[in-house]
Amino acid sequence: MNPRKLLVFLIICSLSCGPSLVSSNNVNLEFQFFNLRNLTLLGDSYLRNGVVGLTRDLEVPSSSSGSIIYNYPIAFFDPETNVTASFSTRFAFSIDNINPTSFGDGLTFFLSPNNQTLGSPGGFLGLVNSSQLTKNRFIAVEFDTKLDLDFNDPDGNHVGLDIDSLISVKTANPMLRAINLKSGNLITAWIDYSNERKKVEVFLSYSSFKPDEPLLTVDIDLSDYLKEFMFAGFSASTEGSTELHHIQNWSFQTTGFRPVRPRIHSHNVSDSSVPLRPPPIPVSDSGNRHHKRIGLALGIGCPAFFCAVLVVFGWVSVKKWRGIRTDKSLKAELVTGPREFNYKELKSATKGFHQSRILGHGAFGTVYKAFFVDLGTISAVKRSKHSHEGKSEFLSELSIIACLRHKNLVQLQGWCVEKGELLLVYEFMPNGSLDKVLYQDSESGKTLKWSYRYNIAVGLASALTYLHQECEQQVIHRDIKTSNIMLDGSYNARLGDFGLARLMDHDKSPVSTLTAGTMGYLAPEYLQYGKATEKTDVFSYGVVILELACGRRPIEREEESQKTVNLVDWVWKLYSEGKIVAAADERMTGEFDEAGMKKLLLVGLSCANPDSSERPSMRRVLQILNNEAEPVVVPKVKPSLTFSNSLPLSINEIFSDGEDCGSPKSQLDIRVD
Ligand SMILES: *[C@@H]1O[C@H](CO)[C@@H](O)[C@H](O)[C@H]1NC(C)=O
Ligand SMILES: *[C@@H]1O[C@H](CO)[C@@H](O)[C@H](O)[C@H]1NC(C)=O
Ligand SMILES: *[C@@H]1O[C@H](CO)[C@@H](O)[C@H](O)[C@H]1NC(C)=O
Ligand SMILES: *[C@@H]1O[C@H](CO)[C@@H](O)[C@H](O)[C@H]1NC(C)=O
Ligand SMILES: *[C@@H]1O[C@H](CO)[C@@H](O)[C@H](O)[C@H]1NC(C)=O
Ligand SMILES: *[C@@H]1O[C@H](CO)[C@@H](O)[C@H](O)[C@H]1NC(C)=O
């Protein structure tokens, strides 16, 4: 065994021999509030202020479904001891209706062998696919607020246990405990399964004290359904309604596994506890067993072994160790998310990068549509001809991008670095980019509806709040513009090209002239100093919002006078004259909510304020758009900006930080699209 390998074992050992010698592989999760890092959001679910929303929270007349799933598999069955775990969970939820006459369908807590469980809107509770009713496997407790005769529902207010089907095994009416699921009040639910007693019990209360008597009791042996590893989550759906489904907090435990032996697969983490890396998802059974054996062997002799190895390998430099570690963790991270594609695969999926497959050209390179025949999927492939020398640096940047997950970001599915080319594989967005929909489609008489526009503004704000404030490492986008905003099947905004500016920073090739940003969207201080910050992103967002509201490009040439008109100046002038709503896109023919339009325009102006310190944060913008915060007061006259010594940054600071394009000359490289 070479020293490196031993060292890796040492790391595995020190991770596993601590807690696993004393604890079993029972799981204990506690979320006092929710955190994106532990959850996968599917469908229309979202996270706001630590609270999960399962369905869309806007008045869109279409239906919505969503689910959230805890990222790591939970053990429910131990094949070596033939033990099935018992479990108990508690969560606080609310189901509100903005419009009391239109009900949604309700929500579920579920366990599933699959981490992608998402069902259809309507009566399917976000759990079952309407076109393949028997596809998804689950054990779920439904909190159903709509009478659906297809699934033998007793009424529009019931709790039921569902196994692989929405036709409940047994239901109960919460009115027995004077509880109305649709009341909008916070309700706490407890679900307990005892494998010894073969019994599921569900308790409900408006308070956070567990009642003595369960509302629903089902005598059932779940050991046939509880697999070795399952994923836990919540799902919900609406049916053309405005019902909101929120989960405030959640705790989950399994019990019953005896502490037989140390196992790598034990996890005992709570949201406030030690930053132990989550266990890797087992790839195959044999590999798994192999790991266990290592854990066992090293676990027994661990303290002695640890000391011996420490002495022997004292000479290994920290630098070397770091190298190994980043390599390992990098691979681990990339394995669970996006994967590496091989060049051949991508080449054949794009018909050899054929012209007919070109979807567009971006700052990063050309975008192709790719059909993966074997998988039956479509993706978008971005192809860059930039050479990427420092491959490990590049991979570490890529791993940051790969870890970004948000329902309003275009998800990276994979990458390929081969033959001096870099290819990135993304989800395919059927409705194309916002600029196309906003400008080209309207030429053919189609106009983007107001409700969609507002929804896009909110989605984009949500994505940027995530990139700026919620993800592990802050990401400045640097190139927010309508052609980078994609629209999914339901016209939700999906921001693309995030993190690419970071990748480009590491491109050391001397001919690189890429300066992130596009004329018309660049904040004045960025043009002046070339320094990208959160606030320069906010500026670009402001311009996009004004475009959405006005249906005009950021810089337009007037037909008669041939004068160029800057959108921000134009809207600000109308605002000064007290007629801001006149800026609204004429093509909507007045079909919009005037107060909402005014709000959107004012948010746009406040974001596009020339003075960066006056611009709101993206979080604030999101709150304003969701009516959770007061709008920012916008000065009647557009502030004029002078770059003076009073600016907090000195020129030296700006040009020495090496993060950006470096010389004032590079401003000349800014592309004008
Ligand atoms: C989790 O760890 C804590 C402290 O390390 C311990 O007190 C607790 O019993 C453990 N829980 C389980 C379920 O093993
Ligand atoms: C495992 O347990 C189940 C019931 O709990 C029993 O039917 C089965 O025979 C057991 N299998 C083994 C291999 O012990
Ligand atoms: C249902 O299944 C079909 C076919 O597999 C798929 O295209 C569709 O996206 C699924 N719907 C949901 C909501 O997952
Ligand atoms: C869950 O959240 C609700 C509402 O915020 C709160 O009343 C309750 O005490 C919380 N429960 C736990 C265990 O944190
Ligand atoms: C959730 O993620 C946070 C931050 O990464 C981590 O500290 C915490 O332990 C995780 N909690 C669970 C229950 O996995
Ligand atoms: C789901 O789990 C599989 C392995 O069980 C893993 O490869 C995949 O990355 C997971 N997907 C998500 C979105 O977590």
Image (tube, helix red, strand yellow):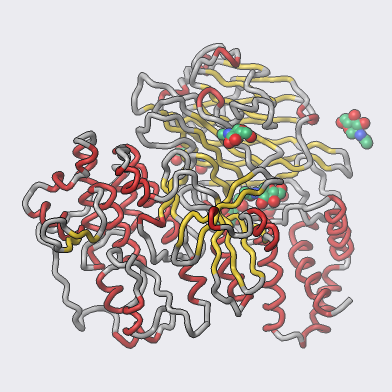
User: Which quarter of the frame holds ligand 5?
Assistant: bottom right
Compared across the picture, whether 112 is left or right of 149 comes to right
Give how far across and how far down residue 2 sits, in percent.
86, 79
Compared across the picture, whether 424 is left or right of 501 comes to right
Q: Is residue 466 visible?
A: yes
Q: Is residue 272 visible?
A: no
Task: Look at the image and tell me in which quarter the C terminus lies.
Answer: bottom left
Q: Is residue 252 above or below residue 650?
A: above
Give how far across and how far down residue 272 sits, in percent.
56, 55
The mark total stands at: 0
- Foreground residue among 44 and 581: 581
Q: Quadrant of residue 118?
A: top right
- Foreground residue among 60 and 108: 60
- Foreground residue among 456 and 331: 456
Give how far across and how far down residue 280 sits, in percent.
72, 56
Residue that lies at the very extreme toward the left in this rendered image: 577
Q: In percent of the image, x 83 and y 54: which residue is there?
A: 288
- Foreground residue among 322 and 539: 539
Give how far across and how far down residue 261 sits, in percent.
85, 53
Compared across the picture, whether 140 is left or right of 103 comes to right
Q: In percent of the image, x 25 and y 59: which residue is there?
A: 554
Q: Quadrant of residue 263?
A: bottom right
Q: In percent of the image, x 30 and y 73: which residue is there?
A: 526
Task: Look at the image and tell me in which quarter the N terminus lies.
Answer: bottom right
Q: In percent of the image, x 19 and y 38: which residue is there?
A: 594
Q: Is residue 613 above or below residue 646?
A: above
